[in-house]
Image: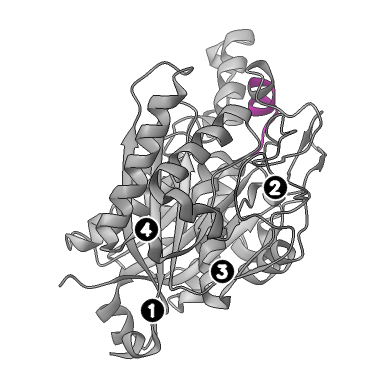
Amino acid sequence: MTDRIVIAGTGVVSPLGAGLADFASALYEGVRADAPCTRFEGHAAEIADFDPQPWLGSGFRAMDRTARLLSVAVHLALSEAGVGAPAGTEVDPDLGLICGTMLGGIHSITSFDWDGITEGPEYVSPMGFANTVINSAAGQAAIKFKLRGVNSTICAGLSSGLYALGYAEGFLQLQRARALLAGGVDELSEEMVIGAGLTGALSPARAARPFAEARDGIVPAEGAAFLLLERGAEARARGVTPTLEIAGFGSAYAGHAFEAHAPMADAARSAIRQALQHADIDASQIGCIVASANGSRDGDATETRALSQVFGDGLDGIPICAPKASFGEAMGASGALCVVVAALALSRQCLPPTAGYDGSAYRLCLSDRTQAIRSDYALVDAFDCAGTHAALVLRRLPAQAAVT
């Protein structure tokens, strides 16, 4: 039997708050974080007045917003895991970082390119160039925290954060790393909001209403969520008593045109079934679902179809939460944020509400209030409009398993 891959620490920065306690408090209160943007015109779930200094101290001046969000989340995860180090020393020479992102530092990239086009290449800032590659945020966080282990950036659309966790779990199972920080990050930028508007993805009503009959689009957001993962035996050797493990992961790609939603549902179904098979459990053992739904008419319908194909008539009895109603569509960070939601739900045996829920177009067990859970397993979905789908099964460890 392979050793469990457990969660030893959690770091989260979101429009609902920075740190697990603030995030959980707002989530369970049903807070909706969307509001008019403070940095540019638009309506989104923004981390207003974001200042990394309380967590990072100094040495972040050259970082763009994406790298700063990632670095704060990494700092919080390391602190909760109890593996911090004095300034200037290494946390752990074998510790690595797996970062999922959809757009990376898109504002840095476009600003650098625009200056080069309009002013000429001799006038661009050389300091800005370091932020123009998709893996720059992960690289800068590794430099900041002296993370000398494997460093990878995964781009899989809206599924990026969940893919990063699945990738890290596999890496640890193969014993190619001792411990890994894994999760997702994306920043809110004017370029992203304009692009989403041009595709017709934004909600004209400026409200994310997952699974609702009147849903009309997404509310864009930003954030970062990273988990410190390690094998259970090594966590216990450090004196940690793990309570949650990654039990299974699955992924699939729908190689069809964007409009081909039936094949996309087939790929999403395949990802979920792979995750269940990897976890060696039956669909009936899932106690709650943290859904990927973000208010997209086609996307939510595709997810519902996939869930129905997997769970059948039992679906309407499984508590479901659609947390993007609270913190918006944070792109590459969303999957990892949803895993944090599932971890909270399993730990408390209580699923948070779906903020603003007032009815669904489908027979789903959603609620604007908390829902009790009677199982040790949670399913997290991450579905992308381009056909990249992922699913992860999280397990609450029984007390006896956590100490043996």
**Magenta stretch: includes residue 65:** no
| Alpha carbons under labels 3 and 1: distance apart | 13 Å
Q: Which residue is mark 3?
A: 345
Label 3's element?
helix
Q: Earlier in the sequence, mark 4 or mark 1?
A: 4
Tell me the distance, in whole angstroms, between the alpha carbons under discs 4 and 3.
18 Å
On screen, residue 368 versus residue 398, left or right, reads right
Tally the numbered discs.
Answer: 4
What secondary structure is found at the residue carrying circle 4? helix
Seen at 56% across and 75% down, the residue is: 349
Looking at the figure, which quarter contains the N terminus?
Answer: bottom left
Identify the amino acid type marked 2: Ala
**Which tag, 2 or 4, sits closer to the chain's start?**
4
- What's under tag 3, amino acid-wise? Ala
Q: CA distance from mark 4 to mark 1?
A: 18 Å
Q: Which residue is mark 1?
A: 397
What is the span of residues highlighted in magenta in the rendered image?
188-195
Residue type at mark 4: give it. Ala
Q: Position of residue 60 (x, y in %)?
A: 58, 51
Give coordinates of residue 203: x percent, y percent: 74, 29
| Nearer-N-terminus badge (2/3) | 2
Between 71 and 276, the residue placed more toward the observer is 276
Q: Which numbered disc, 1 or 2, marks the residue that appears first in the sequence?
A: 2
Image quadrant holding the C terminus, namely: bottom left
| Viewer-closest of 331 and 57 | 331
Residue at image position (60%, 50%) is: 364
Residue 74 to residue 83: above or below:
above
Please state the horizontal and vertical placement of residue 178, each as a whole percent of the image: 25, 67
Label 2 with label 3: CB-CB less than 8 Å: no
Give the residue at x 78% y 57%.
31
| Residue highlighted by disc 2 | 325
> What residue does disc 4 label?
283
